[in-house]
Image (cartoon, rainbow, N blue to C red):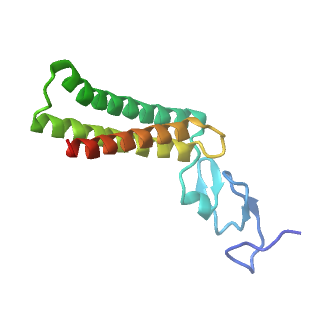
Amino acid sequence: MTSPCRNHPTVRNEEGCARCYETYCSVCFFDLDEGPVCPPCMMRPPAGGPKGALLYSLGGFGCAFAAAAFLGTMVLYGVMTGEELVDPWATLIGMATMLACFGGIALSFMGRDLSRGTGATLPMVGIVANLLLTLVFVLMSIIGSFM
């Protein structure tokens, strides 16, 4: 004996969702190439598996590498030349650093969403790395404003 549909209490469940395997009545399902998909699963993207998560996570790490390179440029320029960066260049490099950090955080969160259910830890490492770089940049900006 089947239970009633969650959305239509007077109708019995007929089939399971192709993504989460929850049962609903045939009225609730969306017919996709992968099979019937329930309303909650239609509201979130399908799991991309390790391949999708890896691509977004690597993009997040690429952004973290770019942000670290920009931060290194800002620090090493003063050390190598003995001069400070002039205002337009310092502003441009600072903006590029923040964009790289925020882009890396966004890509890592997308990788985390695509890897749900796979146990992948790489997206979280990307999120933490980009957040730490953002924190370092903000601290450098605060220290630099007092010098």
Spot the residue most to the right. Answer: 1
> Quick check: 45 left or right of 101?
right
Q: Is residue 23 above or below residue 50?
A: below
Quarter of image, res 61:
top left
Residue 31, percent from left and from top: 60, 57
Q: Quadrant of the N terminus?
A: bottom right
Q: Does residue 74 show up?
A: yes
Asked whether the viewer can see residue 103, the reply is: no
Question: How far from the left and from the top, in percent, is residue 26?
Answer: 69, 66
Q: Which residue is farthest bottom?
A: 10
x, y percent for residue 48: 56, 41
Horizontal side of 73 relative to 9 (left or right) equals left
Viewer-closest of 144 and 128: 144
Task: Measuring from the top left, give residue 136's x and y in whole percent.
Answer: 37, 40
User: Which residue in the rendered view is the most extreme toward the front?
Assistant: 147
Please tell me which residue lies in front, 135 or 23: 135
